[in-house]
Amino acid sequence: MSQAGKTRPTRGATDNALSGRFNLPTHEADGDWLDARDVVDGAVAPARTDIQVVHPKTAITYNKSPDIAFDRSINTIQGCEHGCIYCFARPTHAYHDLSPGLDFETKLFVKPDLPALLRAELAKPGYRVSPIAMGTNTDPYQPAESRWRITRGVIEVLAEHDHPLVITTKSDRVLRDLDLLAPMAAKGLVAVAISVTSLTPRVAMTLEPRAPHPEKRLAAVRALADAGVPAFVNIAPIIPAITDSEVEAIIARAAEAGATNISYIPVRLPWEVAPLFRAWLDAHFPERAGKVMAIIQSLRGGRDNDPGFFSRMRGQGPWAELMRTRFQIAKARHGFPQERRKLDMRCDLFRPPAGAQGELF
């Protein structure tokens, strides 16, 4: 029995179809007996989370995208239990012959070797320091981090060797590592960006079903700022006719919380994210689904998604210009810098780990 179109408690995607993009058959991904419970009693069963350990060969991933402010990142978990329906990382699960839908939220891959791999990579003679980004693919502080503590292990290595770091998250769990982040911030080595998409509980609970409440995220911004850690707020993404009415309110709350600056990105719907998002709209906002997609296509040159560098981050057309204007006016009203400033991260303090032989003496 197909599970397409059904909402599940605390999950974002409404179906679990496989991609077919890599010449794999398109079918409904298998669940376990608990997921089949609706066949027996007519109820939609909550999907369980399965975690597998994987052993990558490297810790750092490099990119050459000209519209991204960093050239390297670390991703501690593949898949994300937060279940954000708009997540542009969902298509990566297709590489595993898994669905970018429910599988992305329920079948996770953790990498406990990352701290050791990172230490070895930092020790290589040819390594050149530049800020490492975490949370640019999937969230480093999703629920699994509470058990595995891989993100903390990575931060411990970076802190030990005075390596700069930028973290993006939508979780107040980042405060669990404040004992590491505050001393790094005192040296100019770290900044944290907290994503706040909506302040409306009903919207947040369907849009980001397992992410912490927006009020907890704003409280985390305040706690970070009070500890001397540069804290930014990202309105990422802004969804037309769903969350765009909240832009000014989020900017005001970010200012009250002590955020250093604020940014935004219009919603992006690459590959399998577009049909998942359409199904989510049909399930939760059927009365405005057509309007939402029409505005998104206006922003994206008539398509569901625009993959072009730079334009993918800003959008185009009158809706994009209106969004930019509202954003800039609200920023000015609350005293945020008008220009997006480059993070001033210290790279000159970096001390590479000693090699295996050096540690003997």
Image (cartoon, grey):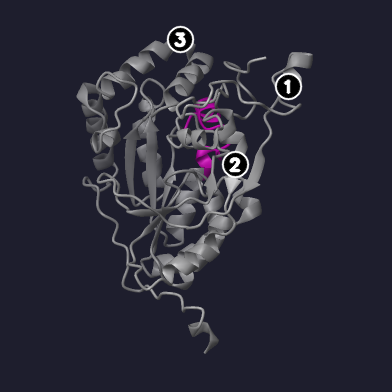
Residue in view at x 63 percent, y 51 percent = 146
Q: What element carries label 3?
A: helix
- Please determine whether, in this image, residue 102 is positioned above or below residue 356: above
- Estimate the x, y position of residue 64 in percent, counting from the top left: 29, 49
The magenta segment is 199-216
Single out the residue that lies furthest toward the right: 40
- Please determine whether, in this image, residue 64 is positioned above or below residue 298: below
Q: What is the CA distance from the residue labelled 1 to the residue labelled 2?
A: 20 Å
- Estimate the x, y position of residue 185 in percent, counting from the top left: 41, 65
Single out the residue that lies furthest toward the bottom: 361
Residues 287 and 89: in front is 89
Q: What amino acid does circle 3 point to?
A: Glu
Q: Is 85 included in the stretch rendered in magenta?
A: no
- Say whether disc 2 or disc 3 marks the residue closer to the N-terminus: 2
The answer to the question of whether label 2 and label 3 lie on touching residues, with beta carbons closer than 8 A, is no
Q: Is residue 325 left or right of residue 211?
A: left
Residues 330 and 155: in front is 155
What residue sits right under mark 3 in the picture?
287
- Say whether disc 1 or disc 2 marks the residue closer to the N-terminus: 1
Q: What is the CA distance from the residue labelled 1 to the residue labelled 3?
A: 30 Å
Q: Which mark is residue 36?
A: 1
What residue sits right under mark 2 in the picture?
108
- Please determine whether, in this image, residue 12 is positioned above or below residue 125: above
Q: What amino acid does circle 1 point to?
A: Ala
- Estimate the x, y position of residue 165 in percent, counting from the top left: 40, 60
The answer to the question of whether label 1 and label 2 lie on touching residues, with beta carbons closer than 8 A, is no
